[in-house]
Image: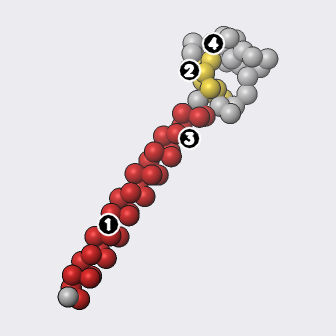
Amino acid sequence: MSYKCSDCSYKGTQLSQGYCPACGSPCYRRINRVYREEDTKRLSTLKILLLISLWLSLAYLVYEKL
Ligand SMILES: [Zn+2]
């Protein structure tokens, strides 16, 4: 779990008793989940492109055999 401070944009994995360790602000966001969703989206787009290219190459090979 990562956190980002809203006041000083400090990023870290630990808070000191619920406050930002850099500036002491209680305003922070959890950022781990957002990055994980972006990674999943990027990965699925890559998988779809790979799937399309494999189907196109298969169709081309079948067409060559006919
Ligand atoms: Zn801070």
> Within 10 Å of the Cα at label 3, are there few (<14), some (14-19), or many (20+) other Cα atoms?
few
Q: Which of disc 4 and disc 3 is earlier in sequence?
A: 4
Disc 3 residue type (three-letter)? Arg
Instruction: Residue 60 in the image: state x and y as whole percent.
Output: 24, 77
The mark lying in front, picked from 1 and 2, is 1
Instruction: Identify the disc placed on residue 36.
Output: 3
Q: Amino acid at mark 4?
A: Cys
Amino acid bearing label 2: Ser
Q: Which sits in the foreground, 20 or 49?
A: 49
Dot 2 beta carbon under 8 Å from ligand 1: yes
From the image, tell me which residue sits under label 2. Answer: 9
Query: Are the two marked residues, 1 and 3, in contact with CB atoms closer than 8 angstroms?
Result: no
Question: CA separation, marks 4 and 1?
Answer: 46 Å
Q: Report the residue marked by disc 4.
A: 27
> Contact (CB < 8 A) between labels 3 and 4?
no
Across and down, in percent, residue 23 comes to 66, 13
Residue neighbourhood size for the residue with mark 4, other residues' Cα within 10 Å, grouped as few (<14), some (14–19), many (≥20): few
Q: Position of residue 61 (x, y in %)?
A: 27, 82
- Mark 3 vs ligand 1: CB under 8 Å? no
- Amino acid type indicated by mark 1: Ser
Count residues near mark 1 (Cα–Cα under 10 Å), then give few for <14, some for 14-19, many for 20+.
few
* Callouts 3 and 2 close, C-beta under 8 Å: no
Rendered position, 57 above or below 17: below
